Image (cartoon, rainbow, N blue to C red):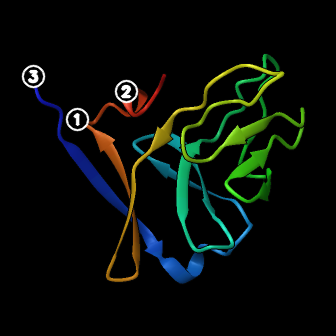
Amino acid sequence: MEMTTNYYSIGPLEECLAQVGRVVIIEDQEIAVFRTSDGNVYALANKSPHPKGGPLAEAIVSGHYIYDPLHDWKIDLTSGAVQAPDTGQVATYPVIVKNEVVQIGFYDNNPSLVNNK
């Protein structure tokens, strides 16, 4: 069965400030959206993989990584992988910018399947 991607517009690119996370809700899922200083936009689940959790939208952005604001875990924005010495994975979502509007993709209305490794 082939999965299709449904894209949801979250607003103009200019509303995604560089180095600042924001939260959007799509299909009852909290998504943390980040725009890096080079202009790329990334979307991840807004929950730290740390056992005590926490919101990732408040993370510190450095290059293509974020630092969990509560536990200082380093997370790759491109893959959602937690960097050593810690371990874990954050679900990531495909992002496209079309006509200066940011869109986040979900597969077959099941956001839990999106790049969740």
The structure residue drawn at horizontal position 39% and vertical position 34%, both measured from the top left corner, is 114
Viewer-side residue, 6 vs 90: 90
Is residue 54 shown left or right of residue 5? Answer: right
Please report contact status of discs 2 and 1: CB closer than 8 Å, yes or no: yes
Graded by Cα atoms within 10 Å as few (under 14), some (14 to 19) or many (20 or more), the crowding at tag 2 reads some
Please report contact status of discs 3 and 2: CB closer than 8 Å, yes or no: no
Residue located beneath label 3 in the image? 1
Q: Secondary structure at mark 1?
A: loop
Question: Callout 3, which amino acid?
Answer: Met
Cα–Cα gap, marks 2 and 1: 9 Å
Q: Which mark is residue 108?
A: 1
The structure residue drawn at horizontal position 54% and vertical position 55%, both measured from the top left corner, is 42
Q: Which quadrant of the view contains residue 56?
A: top right
Of labels 3 and 2, earlier in sequence is 3
Above or below, comparing residue 89 to residue 57 in the picture:
above
Q: Position of residue 83 (x, y in %)?
A: 74, 30
Graded by Cα atoms within 10 Å as few (under 14), some (14 to 19) or many (20 or more), the crowding at tag 3 reads few
Q: Position of residue 41 (x, y in %)?
A: 53, 63
Is residue 116 shown left or right of residue 82? Answer: left
Residue located beneath label 2 in the image? 113
Above or below, comparing residue 108 to residue 50 in the picture:
below
Q: Position of residue 73 (x, y in %)?
A: 83, 33
Q: Secondary structure at mark 3?
A: loop
Above or below, comparing residue 58 to residue 75 in the picture:
below
Question: Callout 2, which amino acid?
Answer: Leu
